Image (spheres, rainbow, N blue to C red):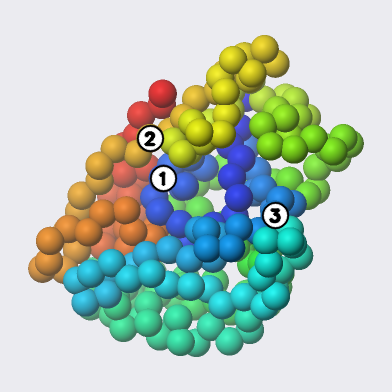
Amino acid sequence: MKLGIMQPYFLPYIGYFQLINAVDKYVIYDDVQFIKGGWINRNNILLNGDKFMFNLILKGASPNKLINEITVNSDQSKLLKTIENSYKKALCFETVFPIVISIFKYNDKNLANFIGNSIVEVCNYLKINTEIIYSSKLNKINNSKGQDKIVRICDLLKADIYLNAIGGQKLYNKETFKSNNIDLKFLRSNLICYPQFRNEFVPFLSILDVMMFNSIEEIKCILDNYELI
């Protein structure tokens, strides 16, 4: 069984969804410390032809708290308006923007649940049927951390293959996983290019950018455009 485990990121890049699509079960890693200045609550969209970083406004964000102990601000109207203005002339805007509105209107403002819902909404739109689980709901029993905690989750869910994003090469050791009968592989997205507006292509933006300029059928092809190493 193939398993993926990642922290919840708000509207992340296509590689995050390539990973979800590539596994049988996906764990939203919500009971670990919040990384201030990381990618949990921010990403990049296309604004006036350039990369623009957006931020989901949070309450009480601190590296001393777990992700699932932080709250999303109830007023995200400025960010929603920025997204609308950025993409209102995009090919798929009329189809995609109602999904964006639905994501922002989600009532549960717990950061982990709010982002988790956004991940599910995007997966539903892209017809990704992978089972999604929250790590905080698992009975991990021990107080293991880091790589050992990941191995423990793999063991609990009976995974024999663990897929991680390419950045995980700095964090996880293949031999450690192999000694626990788990095959560790890293997913590296290939360079993806598609028509945006009449500007030079800007790569590695939020999944929103991919959705705004590509049909579901085109995105399904993009989801398979990666290498496992």
Quadrant where the image shows the C terminus: top left
Instruction: Find disc 3 in the rendering and name its residue.
Output: 33
Q: CA distance from mark 1 to mark 3?
A: 22 Å
Quadrant where the image shows the N terminus: top right
Q: Would you identify the image quadrant in which residue 34 lies?
A: bottom right
* 146 horizontally vs 105: left or right: right
Q: Nearer the viewer, mark 3 or mark 2?
A: 3
- The kind of residue on which mark 3 rests is Gln
Q: First in sequence, mark 1 or 2: give its number.
A: 1
Q: Residue at x 49, y 31 (%)?
A: 169
Percent of width and height locating residue 226: 34, 34
Q: CA distance from mark 1 to mark 2?
A: 8 Å
Q: Residue at x 74, y 61 (%)?
A: 64
Instruction: Find disc 2 in the rendering and name its residue.
Output: 188
Q: First in sequence, mark 3 or 2: give its number.
A: 3
Q: Nearer the viewer, mark 1 or mark 3?
A: 3
Q: Nearer the viewer, residue 34 or 87?
A: 34
- The kind of residue on which mark 2 rests is Arg
Asked whether residue 23 is in view, the answer is no
